Image (cartoon, coloured by chain):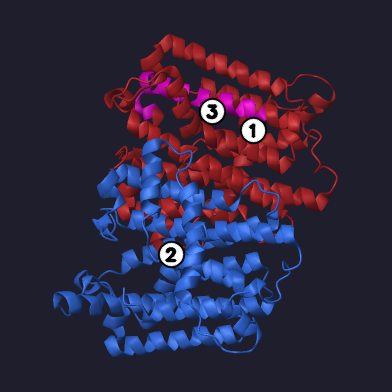
Chain colours: A blue, B red
């Protein structure tokens, strides 16, 4: 038992070491992805898939999967007693953590292409289509999406088929036309339009919120969350997902202003509706804090004993500077 | 019992009415896809998804799913006795039939894009990116892939989670980097190269063969095929998959654009290696007949009582004129 866990067991509030916790978990995720992604793919395609995925990034989605799983099975999850089942669920969670990141990575590859956002730089490196050509980028994105579902359905008897099917169901819905792809289509159709706050919320609920929320719920499913915890974590995921986007919109303005001395960033330049353009900067910042409070309130209502990692991730999402 | 079935029961060989059989089954498939595809998607995206899918096509893959299912459960499949389970498996099979077609449809949408084959005509109609723009075509393809996995994982207690997980596993592997997307990457890298017959075979085994074979095996899984039938159907699917491509290469040379509904002579014009360029026309035609014989031999070894639909589909694949 580490110091933090011991403090919780003794009823002493302990500062949660998010950096240490993340380092530990991301090490597993990075190793697993390094081993799995592009394995068995034709050379050029495999290289493009790995380039798209193994380049850092915040890994917020995998961390949400792992944090939700921990929160649930450290509580009263049904997997606590059976060691073999627990090993299977640990493996399922790791696979789910990688799968959500693959969906996120593929969406960035396709988003960056000339026919979409036409971005040439991502995380300081040439984007996939710049590096490998458009055709390979298109295929790499397609293959990454398929691979996410491969990861969720291993021929591994330790992971019950019901868990495999549930994870596929959650991921497919979050990625598809009623989730991420649907949100991107609304985004595409919204350039130059004056959206209401409700329309903007709906767009982002699909575009980024659905996959962030699914990350939380996939971790919860692996942990065997009960109905109360599930409902609370859905609320947490929804608030966190929306907060993520509001902060993205704020950073687009603030970061540009600081570095370039401009008052408007890329979103404004491309005439995209944002929370800042709709509400103004200060009200957008207040809205982000409001959503953070909602996320914390949902965790408090979850009945789970230790939600510190989830709480710290929400704080990180809202208070990040990049 | 219809006349064909009665003839089989009485031991009288009956001519199999593939056209009537297909009409009956495709009616279910078309109605299901018309109801499901694009449902709940944002307007523009949903329209593009429907345009990509609901435009005819031979529907070979759905027919293979349904024919394999029938062949297996009309034999000694474990689903014969339990009515509720049988209804669930019928539903799972219909969903699998639509799912493989969605994967096929999305691959055509992305394949036709300017950065890939740059085709403006498909089945006599403007391709999706011509009709809806490249960004929407990219998203529609992405959303169709996700939706295939959604279809396989309904919240429907009649379909056992083990069947849902198996279907997702089969489809993801066939669609991804060790299947269709991988084959397309090899195709991309092969333009202008002199491939050996073995390299050409490997490319097509992935590019088109994997999904055709998966169609057969997904139907077999829904029917609860035993080990002998599974092994035989794998052989049938492999032979049929390869035959399909050999015939495609032949038709590209001998048919005209009007008959094909797509641009004829494209392979030679774009310097793509084909069975015709490698073997010559007559040997390629002989090879197709050889593969057809292999497919029939596999069916004969399957131990299944009635494989007439599968046999007729193989005949159709090899003897088609478009």
Direction top: furthest residue: B282
Q: Which residue shows up at 47% across the image and 69% down it?
A: A22
Query: Which span is picked out in magenta?
Result: B233-259
Of the 4 image quadrants, the one containing the C terminus of chain A is bottom left
Where is mark 1, residue-wise?
B20
Whichever of labels 3 and 1 marks the residue nearer the N terminus, that label is 1
Where is mark 3, residue-wise?
B241
Q: Which chain carries label 3?
A: B
Q: Which residue shows up at 44% across the image and 34% down it?
A: B183
Q: Position of residue B117 (x, y in %)?
A: 32, 37
Q: Are marks 2 and 1 on the same chain?
A: no
User: Can you tell which of label 2 and label 1 is closer to the viewer?
Assistant: 2
Q: Quadrant of residue A76?
A: bottom right
Residue A59 circle label: 2
Q: Which residue shows up at 38% across the image and 31% down it?
A: B187
Q: Is residue B15 visible?
A: no
Q: Which residue shows up at 51% across the image and 17% down it?
A: B288
User: Can you tell which of label 3 and label 2 is closer to the viewer?
Assistant: 2
Crowd rating for badge 1 (residues with CA inside 10 Å; few <14, some 14–19, many 20+): few
């Amino acid at each position: 038992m580490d110091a933090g866990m011991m403090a919780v067991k003794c009823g002493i509030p302990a500062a949660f070491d998010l950096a240490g916790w993340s380092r530990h978990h991301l090490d597993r995720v990075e190793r697993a992805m390094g081993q799995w992604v592009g394995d068995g793919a034709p050379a050029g395609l495999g290289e493009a898939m790995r380039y798209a995925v193994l380049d850092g990034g915040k890994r917020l989605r995998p961390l949400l999967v792992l944090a939700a799983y921990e929160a649930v099975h450290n509580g009263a999850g049904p997997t606590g007693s059976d060691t073999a089942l627990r090993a299977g669920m640990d493996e399922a969670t790791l696979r789910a953590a990688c799968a959500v990141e693959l969906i996120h990575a593929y969406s960035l590859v396709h988003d960056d292409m000339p026919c979409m956002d036409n971005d040439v730089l991502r995380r300081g490196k040439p984007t996939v289509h710049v590096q490998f050509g458009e055709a390979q980028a298109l295929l790499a994105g397609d293959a990454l999406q398929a691979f996410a579902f491969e990861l969720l359905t291993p021929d591994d008897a330790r992971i019950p088929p019901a868990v495999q099917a549930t994870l596929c169901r959650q991921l497919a819905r979050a990625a598809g036309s009623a989730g991420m792809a649907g949100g991107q289509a609304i985004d595409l159709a919204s350039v130059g339009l004056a959206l209401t706050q409700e329309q903007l919320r709906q767009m982002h609920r699909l575009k980024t919120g659905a996959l962030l929320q699914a990350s939380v719920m996939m971790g919860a499913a692996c942990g065997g969350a009960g109905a109360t915890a599930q409902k609370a974590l859905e609320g947490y995921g929804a608030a966190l997902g929306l907060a993520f986007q509001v902060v993205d919109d704020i950073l687009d303005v603030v970061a540009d202003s600081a570095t370039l001395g401009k008052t408007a960033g890329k979103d404004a330049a491309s005439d995209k509706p944002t929370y800042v353009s709709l509400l103004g900067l200060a009200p957008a910042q207040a809205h982000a804090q409001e959503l953070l409070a909602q996320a914390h309130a949902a965790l408090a209502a979850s009945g789970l004993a230790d939600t510190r990692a989830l709480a710290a991730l929400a704080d990180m999402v809202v208070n990040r500077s990049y």
